[in-house]
Image (tube, coloured by chain):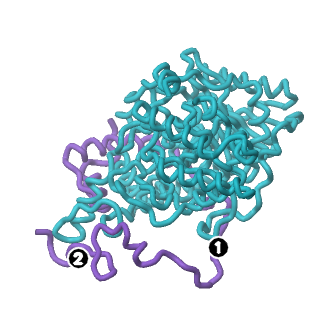
Amino acid sequence: MSEMTNMSAFEIAESVNNQTVTATSVVEKSLALAEALNSKLNAFLAIDREGALRAAAKVDSIIASGGSPGRLAGVPIALKDNMCKVGLPTTCGSRILQGWIPPYDATVTKLLESEGAIIVGKTNLDEFAMGSSTENSAYGPTLNPVDLTRVPGGSSGGSASSVAAGIVPVALGSDTGGSIRQPASLCGVVGVKPTYGRVSRYGLVAFASSLDQIGPFSSSVMDSALTLEVIAGFDLKDSTSYDEQMGSLSAQKGLSVEGLRVGMVTEFVEGSDLEVVSALRDAANALTSLGADVVEISIPETKLGLSAYYLIAPAEASSNLARFDGVRFGLRVEGSNIEETNVLTRTKGFGAEVKRRIMLGTYALSSGYYDAYYAKAQQVRTLIKSGFERAYQQVDVLISPVSPTTAFKLGEKSLDPLAMYLSDVCTIPSNLAGHPAMSMPYALDSKGLPIGVQILAPALREDLMFRLAFALEGSSTGAPSLDDSIKEAINRG
Amino acid sequence: MSSRISPKEVAHVAMLARLSLTDEEAELYASQLSSVLDHASDIESLDIHDLEVTAHPLGLVNRTRSDSVVSGLSQAEALSQAPDEAQGMFSVPPVLGEPS
């Protein structure tokens, strides 16, 4: 069974369109694997067997009648459970949305389905995407398929884990401060945060609106390129979506990186573990041997990113999450009047990390502190943007670690919020600047845990970022070995 | 341990955010929020008062769609997830009056 589920999205779409396999058989195998592994990984909050098989049958019938179902024909895809699909619950990993069935589709859901992709389920996440380990879910943590004693990273841990385990070739996540790239790095898969505005967020439950962006996870660079080509574009329903057409990403495969100027960001290297830095240096050497011109470059402003982020994101979250009040949807804990109902509902419905951020954000926005914290942090964004602009006068793209460490143990950082926040130190500056960045699995540490390399590019230059990723793919050590009990479960299936 | 924000202030902020905390939670959050605010002292001390703020990374402003009628959710769809409804509206506990 693992043979077919390990086909890439590119191969599946080609085979389904050529009629060498049916969408139904591909999807059936993905569902069986999801069901077999979920008791171990807790990667899925919902598996939609019935809906997925119905959609697959539709793709097969289009093929049978000579039609073309699209660029992702029959490709099983998982959605992080903060993106809406009609008929499937969207919980955001929170008790406050338990059982909520959205009455509308996210734009990304529509776009994927219009190209023949099959949504097989919704993946686990830190509650409202707040966290770096997927331990903050009200429905229990997701585990890393490479080592079940370790976290998959977060907040899109379920999406990263499901792709790493080979359940789906592609999953979508959302990235507000690193929530796609960090879990991709910790699980050994590709994870892409596009330019802010590249992908419509309509139907993505908002966390921090000036930072949130949707992007793909996949095993291969090509699958992320294909998926991003499908989901990118202007959307009338998201006024922050960008209307400039994105150039082809898949066409970047095989293009030379000769003469490309690549900067290795000193500040991100400084705080990272030795093995992580050594993987980055290997990647730099590989690029040099391909003819790229690699230099070290300092962007001191990025050091301010963490502080700015942990004021801006909670501030925006405290405003966005005000809508969860027990009135129109989700949990209601009834009190004797409306205000008491609001308080009882929110107190019972939100978990500890969400409450912590709502309070931090409310504090940062409150009278007397607004100028000192929120406004100041928004000015720091300008500083960080100008730091990147200066760097991009000297180089075309940047590389750095994704996460300062490889996957940590469950529970290791859950009692110390600040230590957890520090996992995002290399990823946050791209969100603050709105730039694209991706994690490319590159090496393994001495324990066999995956290490990703981050590729950063100027706004709207996903093409350059992918050119470098395709070039690095050749010298990557490849997929990590999965935990023995996961291998066993796959073989038994 | 620094105390940039006291348990009493935490309780006040929680009230503003419509959350209720036990005394132990207020103590814990006070120390955790203080350590995050301590970390933010690096930006507090910057003298950048004349710098523009960045609210939208690509600088898009005032983007509106054309003023034409498009369909939205039906009343039934909008009410489909309501905890309680009455006569086509969301129904809530009394708005006026003190908690009993």
Using a 10 Å C-alpha cutoff, classify the residue at mark 1 as few (fewer than 14 neighbours), some (14 to 19) or many (20 or more). few
Q: What residue type is labelled 1?
A: Arg
Determine the secondary structure under disc 2. loop
x, y (%) of residue A441?
A: 65, 30
Q: Residue B63 carries which label?
A: 1
Q: Colour of chain A?
A: cyan
The residue under label 2 is B95
Side of A480 where A319 appears, left or right = left
Residue A141 spot, x, y in % from top left = 39, 36
Which residue occupies 33% across, 81% down?
B88
Residue in the picture at 52% in, 23% down: A491
Chain assigned purple: B
Q: Check the residue under mark 2 and report the chain it is in.
A: B
Question: The N terminus of chain A lies in which quarter of the figure?
Answer: top right
Both marks 1 and 2 on one chain: yes
Mark 1 vs 2, N-terminal side: 1
Asked which secondary structure carries label 1, the reply is loop
Quarter of the image where one finds residue A126:
top left
Q: Residues within 10 Å of mark 2 (few under 14, many from 20)?
A: few
Q: Place residue A274 in its image quadrant.
A: top right
